[in-house]
Amino acid sequence: LDRTPAVRLALTQKMAAATFFFETGGDTNWDDALKTTWMTNADVCTWEGLICGAALAAQDARHRALAEEDPLRLSTVIHLLLDDKGLTGPIPLEITLFDKLEKLELYDNALNGTIPKAIGEMTTLEELWLFTNLLTGKIPKELGQLTQLRKLDLFDNLLTGGIPEEIANLENLVELYLGPNKLTGNLPDFGNLEFLEQLWVFGNKLEGAIPDGIASLPNLRGLLLENSPDQNNLTASSTFLNQVVTLFELEALGLSHCGLTGPIPTEIGMMPKLKILRLDHGQLTGILPDTISNIASLAELRVQQNKLTGPIPVGIANLGNLKILNLETAEDGNEFVDNGFGALVIASLPDLEELGLSFIPAVGPFPGAIANLDGLKKLWLAGNGYTGIIPAFLGNLEALEELYIQNNDLTGALPAELGNLESLRIFEADDNQIVGAIPPEFGNLAALVQLKLKNNAITGAIPDMFAGLVNLEMFIVYTNNLVGPLPASIGQAVNLEIIDINDNAITGAIPESLSNLKKARVLVFVDNSLEGPIPAALAEMNSLERIYLNGNAALTGSMPAEICALGLDFLVTDCGFDCSCCTCV
């Protein structure tokens, strides 16, 4: 038998590739075009996704020099590139038989199981891309042995446990993406990784202090550490932001929910490459610096929900690259004063995709210049004090996905034109002075998830619109003047979770079609004029937690035993109603 190194290499690589093929679903799940190039008698260097030294030597001088030193490298697999090819199952251990591998790309597949510890023995690896899979378990500390590694991307998996301290020893690392996952524990101090350009750890469950050393990494271009209420619990020191603004290469800075305090440094205006700035949901004080208007590259600015005060720099309206602007506040948040900024920025930035100005004082009617924001996807204009009617032109904003106009003094009827918004997912118009009926055209809002119209003066019957609202989860219309029956078509909105029609004048029977709502958790029918028996079929709503029926004196009969058997958290009726399992009021 021929035992030459070349033959041994060919046999080893073909065995490794064949094992990889079958264990990752190659015969069943792989992309059809890819399958045809694998498992042939040809050299594995011709199989799609397996790139050998010869191909690389033809492209660059470094690989040519390496091949001159080791001619066998010409037929050695150096890159394994199988992103978005339908791979399934765990990563086979046999992958380590490609012992000269420099780049391993398996992202955008459905690989599961753990990351093999043995990958830490593949010491020639320079790039490891495993993002957007279904990988679980811990990040192996053995990855800390990959001293040549420049890029490590584990983004968007289901990884748990801590971030190994050994990762902080990868001194050649340039890009590190570890979120979103389910990682816990503290964030290691990556302050020694002088070449690091990208550090993303958002979307985990990390806690503790953010190491100050991270703020002094000279080559950082992307730093995304942001938390959210149910994710990371990282906190930044009082000096962290002051250090970060000296990183002049930075293009993206995400410190949302990181407990930032003190003023925003004026030096932030000296970050010439900054495109993304997220400093929202903290305790920042003082004014929003005028210097922020100097960052011409800025495409996203989020400083909502802090303790900022004073006028908003009007120069922001000149930031022509801005796509996302959120300055909104709440009752205990920012206290920006009205300096006409809202109308100015809306008129000056027609390319905005997200605009948040809620609870920033304004006067007069809804800004007419919004009609020109035809790329707008999200609009927060709650609690501004706008008066007059809801403009019909909102129905022309075809890209709109979220619309928040609650807590204003808006009057008139809901425009039927809003029914044109095929992408609308959330519409909140609570706490205004809206009159007239709910337009039946709302039944065209197939993407709608939340519809909240509470505390208005809306009249008429609830339209027979629910057959088209297949994604609706929340229908909240309490404290209006609605009349007539609850339409039977409500049972066709099969994703409904919360229905609240409290404090109206709804009449007729409780529709048996509600039994189709298997995801419904809360029914609030209080203070209406519902009549007749309570349908036993409601017991088929197997996700129910609470039903409130009090204030409907015309309900008859007794509570069906099937509903009592559900053991709901709350089942509330009038005290005169026959129910042994209810709380009566």
Image (spheres, rainbow, N blue to C red):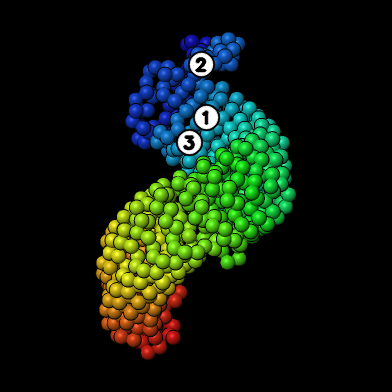
148 displayed left or right of 80: right
> Which residue corresponds to the image point at 29% horizontal and 73% vertical from the top-left?
460
Expressed as whole percent of the image width and height from the top left, the position of residue 362 reads: 52, 62
Quarter holding the C terminus?
bottom left
Q: CA distance from mark 1 to mark 3?
A: 9 Å
Residue at disc 3, secondary structure: loop
Given residues 251 and 315, the one toward you in this image is 315
Circle 2 residue: 59
Expressed as whole percent of the image width and height from the top left, the position of residue 203 reads: 55, 49
Give the residue type at disc 2: Gln
> Which residue corresponds to the image point at 36% horizontal and 50% vertical from the top-left?
398
Q: CA distance from mark 3 to mark 2?
A: 24 Å
Q: CA distance from mark 1 to mark 2?
A: 18 Å
Q: Comparing marks 1 and 2, which lies closer to the viewer?
A: 2
Q: Comparing marks 3 and 2, which lies closer to the viewer?
A: 2
Disc 1 and disc 2 in contact, CB within 8 angstroms: no
